[in-house]
Amino acid sequence: MERHFHEEFKALREKLFQMGLLVEGAIEKAVEALLKRSPELTEQVFEDEKLINQLEIEIDEKGHSLFALSQPVASDLRLLTMILKINTDLERMGDHAVNIAQKSQVLIGGTFLKPSFSLEAMTNDVQKMVRNALDSFMNENVDLARKVLSSDDVVDRYNDTLYTDMTELMQKDPSKVQQALSLVMIGHNLERIADLANNIAEDTIYLKQGKEVRHHFETT
Amino acid sequence: MIARTLAGGALADLDRDDVAQNPVKISVHDLNMYYGNVRALHGITMDIKERAVTALIGPSGCGKSTFLRTLNRMNDTIPGARIEGIVTIDGVNIYAPDVNVAALRRMVGMVFQKQNPFPKSVFDNVAYGPRLHGITDRAFLEHRVEESLKKSALWDEVKDRLHTSAMQLSGGQQQRLCIARVLAVNPEIILMDEPASALDPLSTAKIEELIHQLRKHYTIVIVTHNMQQAARVSDYTAYFYMGSLVEFGETKGIFTNPEKKETEDYITGRFG
């Protein structure tokens, strides 16, 4: 039997998805601001973050009310717990997008340092992870969630390469230290976003199967 | 699959069922109730919203059932019972001398803890109230019975046995039948005194969902010992203790961040 609060769970999950879409957009704009040298796009990221923060509070409050008023158990309990965890993860992603936008502001005026790979490709991969993580959660698609987990290594390699490239560059030309460090920070923030997408994918697997896959620990 | 777009109004407020804007249906001002020399209610003042569920909670003997029964003058039948103060429904003082108590109780129906169907058929149970009010037209009665049973979410389970004894129904079905019997006389307010406390969990869930549906059309005041039930079904909650109203407010606020320590202690099980 469907209980009336199941409708509210559904509405909250949809709200979380809307927040995810805003986060996805903010990440894209933050990197695009650098690639297109657009200060306007960085400003849009800062505006998006305000909305993301507002949604975080709203989802938190509603989630707590639902805990108190509907006393969820079993899959309802897992869903509500996951919604609140993912809410925090998405808000953190928004913060990372702001960090990227701030570093992009530093880099926009100067000569653009190029790593040995396409920063755009790294961003695309991260965005895809975020998107797939959110879709896996919304559709309770465990296969897609596992795909997200397997993508993380690619992003880690991009980040390691960026770190190596920029270290070499700074050693060769110390005048580029500020720019190189900003780029390293952008890579670091993208890598952190990918980690948070991983969290969402892990939570989805737990939600659907009750299986713990965090920290490479998988229950049978 | 989900649509990956921000639909129009997508960031709308999550609280879609807001009843805060509903007008006041029942207004109680400085209500005192006595059983002989014993004062059972102490200066209760509260406004009950229309088309919302208001739950009355509190330990045994706190006065919540006594209060409920003041809202349709059920206490009138108790020798030595008397009240001071004002109770108005739609602005009319229900304790005014010229009030027709039978008409009041038609408008303010009541459902009790123990389901109490009459030893008659399902149909005759629901038709009882309208017949008592002089309705004899068969087609009208059939329509009213069907409508009431549908509203009480019982129709599908009894439509093929309307003329069998109501005593053959399960406890949960009998309680929904009692609700249908109340609905059949077109009340505006429904008082429920622990309507699910004698039922199993599934029947309780059905009653709770029914209350949630009925609140769209009726003002409901429910007494419950089950705090989780109050949290699940009500829009407003009133906490009574020793005949006094300790705290009254939106259920969401009462159960997440009550203003009074006494309320917090009661709902968290630290007291009572």
Image: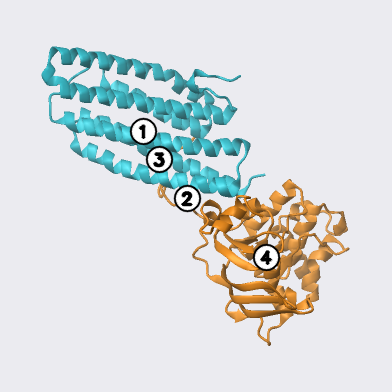
Q: Secondary structure at mark 3?
A: helix
Q: Which residue is mark 1?
A: A93
Mark 1–mark 3 Cα distance, whole angstroms, equals 11 Å
Shade of chain A as shown in the rendered figure: cyan
Mark 1, mark 3: which one is toward the viewer?
1
Q: Disc number at residue B14?
A: 2
Q: Chain of mark 3?
A: A
Q: Chain of mark 4?
A: B
Q: Which residue is mark 3?
A: A19
- Amino acid under label 4? Lys
Q: Disc number at residue B64?
A: 4
Instruction: Tell me, by letter, which chain the rendering colours orange.
Output: B
The quadrant in which residue A105 appears is top left
Disc 3 vs disc 2: Cβ atoms closer than 8 Å?
no
Disc 2 vs disc 1: Cβ atoms closer than 8 Å?
no
Label 3 in the same subunit as label 2: no
Vertical side of B31 occupied by B180: above or below = above
- A117 lies left or right of B236: left
Label 4 in the same subunit as label 2: yes
Label 4 in the same subunit as label 1: no
- Amino acid under label 1? Met
Q: Secondary structure at mark 1?
A: helix
Mark 4, mark 1: which one is toward the viewer?
4
Mark 3–mark 2 Cα distance, whole angstroms, equals 13 Å
Q: Secondary structure at mark 2?
A: loop
Of B106 and A95, which appears nearest the observer?
A95
| Residue in the picture at 62% in, 50% down | B270
